[in-house]
Image (cartoon, rainbow, N blue to C red):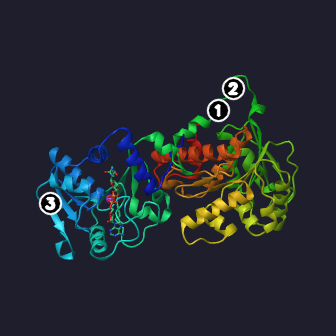
Amino acid sequence: MFNKIITASQMKLADAFTMQSEPISSIDLMERASHAFVDAILHSISIDQTKEIAIFCGSGNNGGDGFAVTRILQERGYNVNAYLVQFRTDLSQDCQKNFNRLTNVEVIDGTKDFPSLEGTDIIIDAIFGYGFKGKTRGWVADLIQHINELDKLVYAIDTPSGLESDGIGKGQVIKAKETYCFQRPKLAFFLPENGEFIGDWKSVNIGLNEQYIQEIDSKLFMLNDHVKTLVQPRQRQSHKGTYGHVLIIAGAYGKIGASVLATKGALRTGAGLVTTLTPRCGYQILQSTVPEAMCITDENEKIIATPIDTSRFSVVGIGPGIGVEKETKKVLKNILKQHRPTVIDADALNLISSDEKLLKLLHPNCVLTPHIKEFDRIVGQSKTSLERFEKQRKFVEEHECVVVLKDAYTSIISPITGNQYFNTSGCSGMATGGSGDVLTGMITGLLAQGYSPIDAALIGVYYHGVAGQAAAEIRGENGMIASDILDFIRL
Ligand SMILES: NC(=O)C1=CN([C@@H]2O[C@H](COP(=O)(O)OP(=O)(O)OC[C@H]3O[C@@H](n4cnc5c(N)ncnc54)[C@H](O)[C@@H]3O)[C@@H](O)[C@H]2O)[C@@H](O)CC1
Ligand SMILES: [K+]
């Protein structure tokens, strides 16, 4: 199963269920979570025992974790000072218990108590956890601003304080270098608006009941390496016909590179045969750069202008670099009418955004791969990513096709189950020209082998990200280019 992403209130229920079923008391669960946090952070960064660590603890259970973490680190010989951020005078029961186990906690009750933290090297943020709602106000907001302005290394327990687990950061929010969340990332972690608060996130297993979490009513999933189970082994007794025949329709004068990248993407995912249709100007380029593919050309020198019968191909991938000329639009329209499994990308999406009639021709065997701007051109601007995801869901329901909304955490929605998957592979080095063309080729290559549109999208997106990460390890995130992604596809 892909890991479910659940809301803050569902997480609270998972905590309660675990306590009752295991059974474990809430204070012991807090202790387990705090040990898990300490183990994870010490595994991730090496902290010299001479370094000064400041831990800001709120009055709720996140603060309780903070006090427990203080004690555990002190017992291990680290130099830690705890501060109680007293946004409420009555501490939660478990917070009070862990507070009582410490001596020398400084209390912050207003601006006058803000520490200067001159000698502090590391800050651990345990002010608010998943119980936070709305936005920070008054001196608590000022304290968060103060911490952010110090520009120190900040590590957040469970979530950066001031961020609602299921929403977009408003007001002052801690800007963490890393966030260590318990058991599951929050929906907030996948929203681009929150990137600056969360930093890198890691989930820390605190032994909550997994079966209970997986049975919670949620349509949100993490796309992770469980995707491996969808990949079918190649058969010993097979030939190239077993793995489908891809038709890539890509490229225009000055953009033949897009067709090269998409063609290679299809080949690298295991398609049996790949034929690429380009304008005449693309012929030599294609033939010399991708000898494994066949190349057919349009009569036109610079654009693809002539409709093509696709009956001898199993699938079509259309869009990278084709331009938005009206003749090319006719080719796209004709393709959509042929109802072949089709991946629609880039300029093909731009053509769709300019003509409602094309939108009506989408069918359940289509996979659309827009980035945010392309998607907005089709469905209109959204004020927030949450609004855009709503539009993605509506679009998928209305047109019954898979939409792969490309971003740092690409969101894929299935028209059959309504499940939304957030991809967890990939890196920022992939934000470079041509990276999307490779993905188009990959998903098309998978469709050709008989994968369903949703499985082809999930496998393609995940392995595209894995290949990107591998490329970045060798080339660096700045140095890598889209061709490097192709070199590291391993399926
Ligand atoms: N047994 C459990 O439930 C466990 C909980 N754990 C920790 O507990 C956390 C959740 O604890 P809580 O539910 O106590 O919540 P928090 O520790 O997030 O604190 C919530 C409190 O913050 C205040 N608050 C909320 N919004 C505010 C706003 N806008 N301005 C000012 N104050 C606001 C409210 O008084 C609320 O009671 C988790 O994030 C995790 O760190 C862990 O210890 C693991 C076990
Ligand atoms: K926190």
Q: Residue at x 18, y 58 (%)?
A: 82
Q: Nearer the viewer, residue 64 or 468?
A: 64
Q: Given contact means CB atoms under 8 Å apart, are the residues at marks 1 and 2 in contact? A: no
> Counting other residues with Cα less than 10 Å from the Cα at mark 3, is it few (<14), some (14-19), or many (20 or more)?
some
**In this figure, which residue is indicated by the disc labeled 3?**
105
- Which residue is painted at 65% across and 53% down in the image? 437
Q: Distance between the residues labelled 2 and 3?
A: 65 Å
In the image, taking residue 475 as reference, residue 341 lies left or right, namely right
Sequence-first tag of 3 and 1: 3
Provide residue 378's location: percent of width, then percent of height.
Answer: 69, 67
From what the image shows, is residue 380 above or below residue 420? below
The mark nearer the N terminus, 2 or 3, is: 3
Three-letter code for the amino acid on which mark 1 is drawn: Gln
Identify the residue at image location x=54%, y=44%.
467
Q: Residues within 10 Å of mark 2 (few under 14, many from 20)?
A: few
Name of the residue lying farthest toward the left: 104
What is the three-letter code of the residue carrying label 3? Answer: Val
Q: Name the residue under label 2.
A: 235
Residue sitting at x 87%, y 56%? 307
Real-space CA distance between mark 3 and mark 1, rounded to the nearest whole angstrom: 57 Å
- Asked if 430 appears above or below 224 in the picture, the reply is below
Mark 3 lies within 8 Å of ligand 1 (Cβ measured) = no
Q: In this view, does 482 lie to the left or right of 69?
A: right
| Frontmost residue, 317 versus 360 | 360
Q: Quadrant of the N terminus?
A: top right
Figure label count: 3
Q: Name the residue under label 1.
A: 232
Q: Where is residue 271 in the image (x, y as percent from the top left)?
A: 71, 38
| Residue type for callout 2 | Gln
